[in-house]
Each structure stands twice: as C-alpha cells, then as structure tokens.
Image: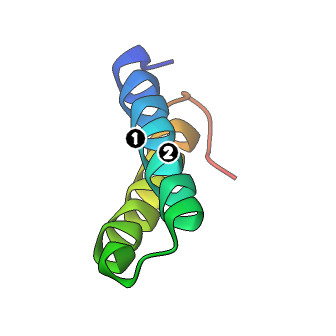
Amino acid sequence: MNTKKVALGVVLLAVSSAILLATGVLQESALLIPAAIASLGMAAGALLVGTAGSGRPV
C-alpha cells in the first residue's frame, strides 16, 4: 500500500470536508466557489485513497 497516496488522500478529504461544513454553517453565497473546489478535493482524495492499494480498485 502506498502510504503517501493514502496520507495525501486523507488530508484532502479532511480539509475539503471542513470547508464544506463551514460553507453550510455560514450560508453565504460568497463561499460557493470554495465549496465547489472542496467537492473536487473530496473526489480527488477518495480517488487517491481508493487506488493506493496494490489490488484492483473497485
């Protein structure tokens, strides 16, 4: 298992989740662009974690 990919993926997931939660709590329209970028960050983090193993990703 590639630990660098997992670590980067977990960091991306954590930071993106925090940004999305903050956007939901603050409910300001100015935060729509960071929320969109955070959703892309979550997708990238999930991809990194999912493909870090040596087997075939599901």
Image coordinates of residue 55 in percent, x first then y, are 62, 34
| Amino acid tagged 2 | Ala
Image coordinates of residue 4 in percent, x first then y, are 34, 20
User: Disc 2 designates what residue?
Assistant: 18
Image coordinates of residue 7 in percent, x first then y, are 42, 22
Disc 1 from disc 2: Cα separation: 10 Å
Q: Nearer the viewer, residue 57 or 15?
A: 15
Image coordinates of residue 48 in percent, x first then y, are 44, 42
Residue at image location 51% in from the left, 18% down from the top = 1
Look at the numbered discs 1 and 2 and tell me whether their residues touch, using CB distance below 8 Å.
no
Q: Identify the disc placed on residue 1.
A: none
Q: Is residue 18 above or below residue 4?
A: below
Which residue reaches farthest right? 58
| Amino acid tagged 1 | Leu
What kind of element bears circle 2? Answer: helix
User: Disc 1 designates what residue?
Assistant: 12
